[in-house]
Image (tube, coloured by chain):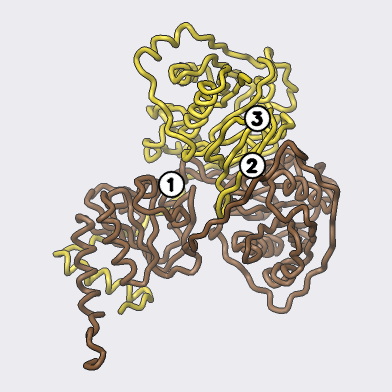
Amino acid sequence: MDLENCRGIMVYCEIDVCGIIDNSLELIGHANTLKEKMEHYPEVTAVIIGSDVGSLITVAARHGADRVIMMDNPRYRVYRPDLYSDALAAAAEKYRPEILLVGASLSGEEIGPTVAMKLHTGMAAHCVELKIRDDGQFVQVVPAFGGKVLGDILCPGFRPQMASMKAGMVSKRIFEGKVAEIESFDPDVRGFGDRLQVIETIPETRKRVSLSNAELVVTGGFGIGTQEGWDKLEHMAELLHGVSTCTRPALDAGWTDKEETMVGTSGVAIKPKVYLGFGVSGAAHHTCGIKGAGLIISVNRDANAPIFEVSDFKVVSDWEAIVNAITARLEATSAVCPDPDRA
Amino acid sequence: MALTIAVCIKPVPDSEYYNKITIDPVTKRLNRDGIPTVINSMDKNAIEAALRLREKHGGRVLAFSMAPDTAIENLKRVLAMGVDEAYLCSDRVLGGADTWATSYTLYKAIEKTGPVDLVIMGNQTEDGGTAQVPSQLGEWMGVPHLANVIALDYEDGGMVVKTKADRGTIRYSLKLPAVLAVTRDCNEPRIPSVMDILKVGKKPMRILRAQDLDLNPDFIGIKGSPTQAGEIYSPDMSRKSEALVGDPDEIALRILDELRKAGISIG
């Protein structure tokens, strides 16, 4: 798309069974933060693609959408990357935003670059920061080498300037009582036709762990060493009412199957009040995801572990000795009398 | 039907050495001296997936890479794994390409060497990790493409593919040609034997320069890239790193105390 007559920020709203996902709502909120620094104070437009999704308009508005483009059609009942990409590209062509934001979810990673190709524009993936420079230029900050290096990405000559961001990088904003302008848009979208077909969608049955509101996060790394050790760490986390999370090597070792709790550039970014790390070496991939933590305490046997540099408190020790001691303390204070008559 | 399969390979700095990557304070350039270059991890899963399809259905596997001439060494490894032919797109004018220009160049290279039935790639690279090139290559080719592929097979003239979705999995059928981006869940890549390595010298390997590829000069390298790289920096994440010392019980008490001070209610 050429530069002429492009205005405002468009956010693609990804939907699951519970409605618009947090990742998208966060981006609508952040779009409001960006627009406050932009000339003309442009509109934030949310694009909702789905079937029978009218009830989501108020959700988008309450989280900051000035305008909602409804692409409500039975053809979008089941997610198909080609149809959704065509739909979003058509919306961008019609409404001509300066900036188009997409959540860096698995489906966002399919749709985003596909739309960028269709529109012949640039896209910055997995941004850790999106900002408007004083001269008005939109700056997208991306991680490289697992977060060891950050780089600014600019897209001055093409529109829309596209960016994706993982969940948890920015916070949702609430605009109580806000009413959005609504437009229906139903272009003839065909994707790859019968060259691509969905045979079946198999939903995950396990309840996913949510990290967005976790105040205390207990992370285990590869140093935990065994399944037995992992279970012990999880037990301590439960006693602390904390949420257990993992690093990529711990996940790959198979001690936990909760992939959604993997913290880092290829997983989630977290912002707990306290991060407690055990047997975590501190690879850049991981530490990039914990920089939002209020307090970082880490325990590692290796005095030179890179995790210590980014910690408020460090404990050079075998992780198990510390976990045993914390567990013993907690079990002693929370001991309840097993006989209810005597309680 | 025998399948002609292209796999795309990116040589990347070994992730074991990421902590040694620095930025020169004067030139503001990345210093990665002494850091070995390896084949991107998920690209090995792509090679393995292609080889298994060839073993089951017959055909050829061709590797493509856009990288400097030094990537010849990485492509030798690719050939040792069992790939039949390798093509390296190497030219100064291709340097600095973003995913848009990279996918264009790979598209032209694949087109140049003849039609393929299927392209398999790693879902993302370890260094940049954008996960954008597979979808964009599929768009250049005008063929169906899917990312996050965890299982694939060739059946009745098309592919049956399982992808990891945000809340479950999806099974698709695709007509060929198609582009698939595979993750590490797809398979366990093979390790070449000494015999495999000895066969490498007999396999065709060719460097393609820009002039060999009928490229639109406005679509390649820095000039053809919609995005521009600005400043780079190392985020300073260092904190006070105060040591907690004592016996395990004393340390446990200190940790619990710090949790309370930070506003965590305990027991």
| Contact, mark 3 vs mark 2 (Cβ under 8 Å) | no
Residue farthest to the top, as pictured: B202
Mark 1 lies on residue: A285
Residue placed most toward the observer, B34 or A55:
A55
Q: Colour of chain A?
A: brown
Q: Nearer the viewer, mark 3 or mark 1?
A: 3
* Quarter of the figure with the C terminus of chain A: bottom left
Mark 1 surroundings: few (<14), some (14-19) or many (≥20) residues within 10 A = many
Give the x, y percent position of residue B96.
Answer: 60, 30
- The quarter of the displayed image where residue A129 is located: bottom right
Numbered-mark total: 3
Q: Secondary structure at mark 1?
A: helix
**Mark 1: which amino acid?**
His
- Colour applied to chain B: yellow
How far across and down, in percent of the image, does residue A290 sit? 43, 57
CA gap, disc 2 and disc 1: 31 Å
Q: Earlier in the sequence, mark 3 or mark 2?
A: 3
Q: CA distance from mark 3 to mark 1?
A: 41 Å
Q: Quadrant of the N terminus of chain A?
A: top right
Left or right: B1 as drawn, with respect to B41:
right
The chain letter for the residue carrying disc 3 is B
